[in-house]
Amino acid sequence: RSSVEGFVVDTSTVDASGPLIVRAMQVGERNPQRYTAAADASGRFAFPSIESGRYVFQVYRDRNANGLHDGGKPFPLKYSERLSPISDTLKVRARWALEGVTIRMNE
């Protein structure tokens, strides 16, 4: 096991309600691990105990605080919660903390 720490950079002032939820998704495995963590008010997030492997990271603004990304719907009109692009694949090594991960949100 290891740990991952980083920051979410969200420069939007229009859609800033609700917590930022960070997802870590393991890639290249038969049974991939998935982890979720909330970023604090400054954008800092941490996964204190994560399996080693290759991961991609993504963040979304959880406007309704239900813990899920809501994709919106056309009728009645409900806009999708903002979702960041998927990060580059990062390697998490056993007993080796991965620090300084930065995820940027689109406006």
Image (cartoon, rainbow, N blue to C red):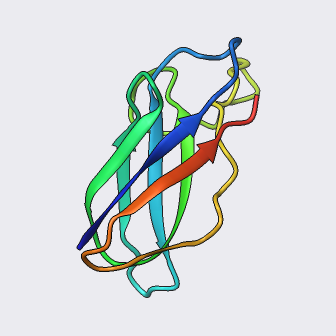
Q: Which image quadrant: the N terminus?
A: bottom left
What residue do we see at 64% from left, 59% from top? 87
Q: What residue is drawn where x is 36% and y is 79%? A: 93
| Quarter residue 42 falls in | top left
Q: In which quarter of the image is the C terminus?
A: top right
Residue at image point 69% right, 30% down: 73
Going 39% across and 35% down the picture, which residue do you hit?
Answer: 67
Residue 13, x across and y down, in percent: 68, 13
Residue 91 against residue 72 in the figure, above or below: below
The number of callouts visible is 0
Look at the picture and state if 6 lies above or below 80: below
Figure check: 2 above or below 4:
below
Q: For residue 96, what is the image quadrant?
A: bottom left
Which sits in the foreground, 64 or 83?
A: 83
**Above or below: residue 29 compared with residue 86:** below
Q: In this view, does 26 lie to the left or right of 74?
A: left
* Residue 9 percent across, percent down from the top left: 61, 34
- Given residues 88 and 98, the one toward you in this image is 98
Q: In this view, does 50 lie to the left or right of 72?
A: left
Name which quarter of the figure residue 16 lies in. Answer: top right
Percent position of residue 86, x then y: 65, 57
Q: Is residue 42 left or right of residue 80?
A: left
**Residue 30 at x, y percent in the picture:** 43, 87
